[in-house]
Image: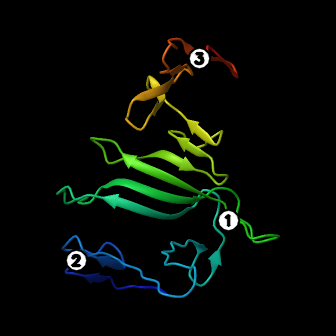
Amino acid sequence: RTLTPALHLRHTRQPQAPLHLTAATKDEGIVVEHNSDTSEGSYLALLKARGTANSQVRVNNGDNLGVLAFGGYNGQSSDPFPMAAAIVARVDGEPAAYPTMDMPGRLEFMTAADNTTELITRMVISNDGSVGLSTSIPQAMLDIRSTSTLAQVWRDSAGVVTASMTAAGEFYANIPGLSDKVSRTGDTMVGPL
């Protein structure tokens, strides 16, 4: 069904969607409560189809299925709530209905850097569970792309760096008596560990 008029609660001056809620205190918001003697809980579904409401068509690889966006008021009348971060769900492969139901998906975690409102994808979880940091197409279960000096840093529970890896693939371990590094040559790690 199509909602034409905008429903706005709490005196929203300029509704930006068919349902626009405005909260005045920290205790106001949206609550979905589920009470039953089952293992199921509440959920919020963001659904997407191509076509129209009366003639739906299958989504395509790369289609945006939904966005959870976070914005802050900046006082500019042209864009008073620019986005600072977002989580985007996309189709990540070719969906199918036959011979089995298939809807491959991915999540993209985005943030805007200081002095800009442009959202950049910082982390991706692809349809096979691979995680990419600063890369949108992970080539391994954990794929970290870095252009800074250090690509990875590991810390203990006290916050002390125990190991680090440079963007060039050199691994340093903060182990008593070990001052040398482990370096990468092709697919081989070489060093004193």
Can the viewer see residue 110 in this picture? yes
Disc ID at residue 182:
3
Q: Which residue is found at the position 66% from the left and 60% from the top? A: 104
Question: Residue 136, can we see it?
Answer: no
Of circles 1 and 2, which is in front? 1
Specify the amino acid type for callout 3: Val
Q: Earlier in the sequence, mark 1 or mark 3?
A: 1
Identify the residue under disc 1. Answer: 103
Query: Circle 1 sits in a helix, a strand or a loop, which is it?
Result: loop
**Which of the two discs, 2 and 3, sits closer to the camera?**
3
Most foreground residue, 168 or 98 = 168
176 shown above or below 85: above
Please tell me how crowded label 2 is: few (under 14), some (14-19), or many (20+) other residues with Cα within 10 Å.
few
The residue shown at (28%, 81%) is: 8
Q: Is residue 91 above or below residue 19?
A: above
Q: Would you call the spot at circle 1 few (<14 residues within 10 Å), some (14-19), or many (20 or more)?
A: some
Query: Residues under labels 1 and 2: Cα distance?
Result: 37 Å
Closer to the chain start, of discs 2 and 3, is 2
